[in-house]
Amino acid sequence: MKVAIIGGTGDFGLALAARLVEAGDDVVIGSRDAARAQEKANEVGCRGDGNEAAVGDAELAVLATVADAALATAQTLRAFFRSPVLSVASELEFHDRRARPPAQGRSLAERIDEVVDVPVVAGLHSLAAGKLAHGRPDEDAFVCGDDEEAKTLALELAAKVVAGRALDAGPLASARALEGLTAVIVNLNKRYKGHAGVHVTGLP
Ligand SMILES: NC(=O)c1ccc[n+]([C@@H]2O[C@H](COP(=O)([O-])OP(=O)(O)OC[C@H]3O[C@@H](n4cnc5c(N)ncnc54)[C@H](OP(=O)(O)O)[C@@H]3O)[C@@H](O)[C@H]2O)c1
């Protein structure tokens, strides 16, 4: 699969790129700075380019910028997208050193969906970059979306990067829960000094 990772110079994007390269995918890391993209891409053995060029011939574009910049980046790239977008971003707020999902009811992925002309799916929120960087984590990955073809592509990608299952979590509105799950995981890690991941039980 041809995958572009927008903001792939960051911890999560680079770890994702490493796993996809390992799986044999054609990966291009995107950045606001093409030289920086190539420098980081060299670390994992793939191509790097500016975000605009990176998304041009991708089959799936993973939006992996820092969460605060995801919506604006999607808006900026609107004219360049030729493929579905997979949003992995979760906005977090911190109060008394505890993580909370934002009070805003709609997910970031739903808001991104409103500003681009290609299908948007969301997923991989529960995978920690630190674990992903060292191999396929033994946990499940969730993907949600309203466009079945786009969701199938994203599930295919997810299945390559976890040792557990890639699970269809329903419509794009489920991104509210998946993005919110990040706050739960951050609080669990803090409370129990661990590296939480998710394994769903009870499914055939
Ligand atoms: N870290 C995790 O464990 C984890 C797990 C699951 C999901 N996620 C999600 O993955 C995304 C990336 O997380 P991360 O930890 O990898 O973040 P990060 O390292 O802080 O940033 C990722 C990239 O975002 C780009 N960026 C920064 N500011 C920007 C701006 N104003 N406009 C456009 N691009 C900007 C930078 O790329 P350039 O400067 O090269 O353009 C940077 O390398 C987040 O949305 C996060 O919610 C993270």
Image (cartoon, rainbow, N blue to C red):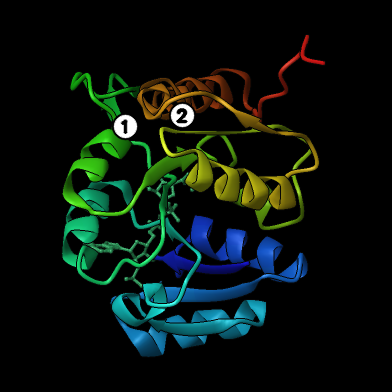
Q: Nearer the viewer, residue 12 or 75?
A: 75
Residue 113, placed above or below residue 5? above
Q: Nearer the viewer, residue 13 or 4?
A: 4
Residue at numbered disc 1: 92
Amino acid type at circle 2 is Thr
Q: Nearer the viewer, residue 78 or 138?
A: 78
Residue at numbered disc 2: 182
Residue 67, placed above or below residue 29? above
Q: Position of residue 148 (x, y in %)?
A: 50, 38
Residue 199, placed above or below residue 131? above
Q: Position of residue 15 (x, y in %)?
A: 60, 60
Q: Position of residue 197 (x, y in %)?
A: 66, 29
Question: Where, quadrant-wise, is the N terminus in this rendering?
Answer: bottom right
Residues under numbered marks 1 and 2 in contact, where contact means CB atoms less than 8 Å apart: yes
Q: Position of residue 180 (x, y in %)?
A: 40, 23
- 68 lies left or right of 149: left
Ligand 1 within 8 angstroms of badge 1 C-beta: yes
